[in-house]
């Protein structure tokens, strides 16, 4: 119980720091914006890679989101929701715009790093094949299903939070997750048998 309350306190403290930095950035403080961007960059890039399946496009989406955050910092209204939700919605919109620019679905080259301290070459080849197949199956999903799965499993967001980010209802998110999991299961049929 103590660990949960400590994690909750850390999350609240992080939210306060982000809100303070955003307020200072809205007043034109470039140093505060750089600090805020440094806090947000790594998780934002990981999310964008999972959604887009392409490292370069993900970097572009994150850069677009940061440019938009800088321009719109003064428009954030804490009375309408959390900064985290507002930021994720902004990032997701930029990532989905990037996804639309992507022609055919690309495998998630950077989203799943399979590493081991002393990898066996055969195991390493099998792991790479498995990762490539899972990545290809995920990359073939429709953008909104992929985004919902990424936010749910990758970022641990609730359906309500995902609904806020994707600007849809919880029921619609439930449907996106259900269809996305079903489609992945279909695309990966036989993989479980091969692994035995």
Image (tube, rainbow, N blue to C red):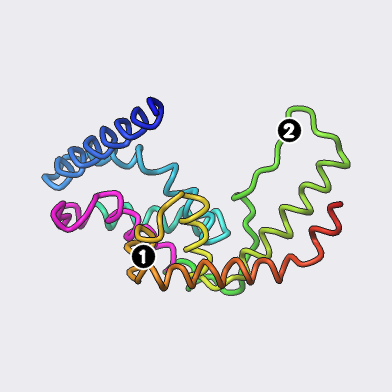
Residue 74 visible at all: no
Q: Residue farthest to the left?
A: 27
Residue closer to the observer: 145 or 193: 193
Q: Which residue is mark 1?
A: 163
Residue closer to the observer: 101 or 46: 46
Asked if residue 18 is positioned above or below residue 56 in the image, the reply reads above
At which x and y percent is residue 32?
Answer: 22, 37
Q: Is residue 104 left or right of residue 31?
A: right
Point out the stretch of residues depicted in magenta. 71-96
Residue 8 occupies quadrant = top left
Q: Is residue 107 left or right of residue 76?
A: right
At which x and y percent is residue 146?
Answer: 53, 65
Asked if the magenta segment contains residue 54, the reply would be no
Asked if the magenta segment contains residue 95, the reply would be yes
At which x and y percent is residue 122?
Answer: 88, 42
Q: Is residue 116 left or right of residue 61?
A: right
What secondary structure is the magenta-colored segment mainly?
helix
Disc 1 to disc 2: CB gap under 8 Å: no
Q: Which residue is mark 2?
A: 116
Q: Residues within 10 Å of mark 2 (few under 14, many from 20)?
A: few
Asked if residue 21 is positioned above or below residue 63 in the image, the reply reads above
For marks 1 and 2, the one nearer the N-term is 2
């Amino acid at each position: 119980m103590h660990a949960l309350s400590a994690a909750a306190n850390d999350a609240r403290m992080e939210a306060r720091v982000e809100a303070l930095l955003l307020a200072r950035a809205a007043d034109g403080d470039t140093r505060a914006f750089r600090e805020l961007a440094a806090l947000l960059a790594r998780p934002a890039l990981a999310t964008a890679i999972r959604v887009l399946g392409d490292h370069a496009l993900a970097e572009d989406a994150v850069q677009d989101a940061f440019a938009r955050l800088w321009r719109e910092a003064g428009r954030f209204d804490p009375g309408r929701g959390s900064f985290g939700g507002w930021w994720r919605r902004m990032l997701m919109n930029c990532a989905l715009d990037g996804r639309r620019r992507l022609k055919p679905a690309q495998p998630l080259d950077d989203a799943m790093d399979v590493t081991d301290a002393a990898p066996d070459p055969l195991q390493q080849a099998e792991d790479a094949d498995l990762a490539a197949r899972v990545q290809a199956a995920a990359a073939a999903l429709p953008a909104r299903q992929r985004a919902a799965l990424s936010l749910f499993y990758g970022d641990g967001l609730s359906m309500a939070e995902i609904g806020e980010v994707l600007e849809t209802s919880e029921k619609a998110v439930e449907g996106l997750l259900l269809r996305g999991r079903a489609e992945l299961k279909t695309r990966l049929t036989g993989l479980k048998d091969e692994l035995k």
